[in-house]
Image (cartoon, grey):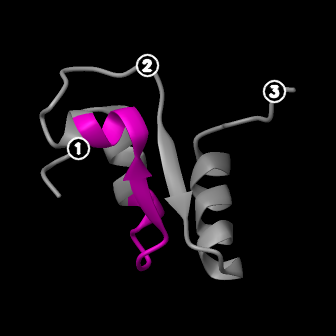
Amino acid sequence: MPPPTNIYFALTEAFNAEGPAVVLASGQAVVYHQIAIMSKDGDWIVRETAAACGQVLRVLADRGARYRP
């Protein structure tokens, strides 16, 4: 993966720091592959394991993310 140039790439790198946990998907995946120049949000496919989910939740908590209903 190239150096993070946007928050979604940086989050993907952080989510996968301890091993494969997520795959960047949807609009940001298209941006990553330089088919589009921007997308408004991020989507990830998360590995269905307790470790992967825990890693994602830790990274988000470390960045102050909160749930919004």
* Residue 60 at x, y percent in the picture: 61, 48
Nearest the eye: 50 or 66:
50
Give the SS element for disc 2: loop
Q: Please give the name of the residue rendered at 34% of the width and 45% of the height, measured from the top-left corner.
A: 10
* Residue 54 at x, y percent in the picture: 68, 69
Neighbourhood count class around disc 2 (C-alpha, 10 Å): few under 14, some 14–19, many 20 upward: few
N-term-proximal mark, 1 vs 2: 1
N-term-proximal mark, 3 vs 1: 1
Report the residue marked by disc 2: 40
Report the residue marked by disc 3: 68
Give the SS element for disc 3: loop
24 left or right of 55? Answer: left
14 left or right of 1? Answer: right
Query: As displayed, is residue 36 above or below residue 15?
Result: above
2 left or right of 51? Answer: left
Instruction: Report the mark closest to the observer, 2 or 3.
Output: 2
Nearest the eye: 44 or 60:
44
Report the residue marked by disc 1: 4
Query: As displayed, is residue 32 above or below residue 35?
Result: below
Amino acid type, callout 3: Arg
Amino acid type, callout 2: Lys
Nearest the eye: 4 or 26:
26
If the image is split into quadrants, where does the N terminus sit? Answer: bottom left
Q: Please give the name of the residue rendered at 29% of the width and 32% of the height, measured from the top-left corner.
A: 6
Q: From mark 2 to mark 3, how far is it between C-alphas?
A: 17 Å
Q: From mark 1 to mark 2, how far is it between C-alphas?
A: 16 Å
* Residue 56 at x, y percent in the picture: 59, 60
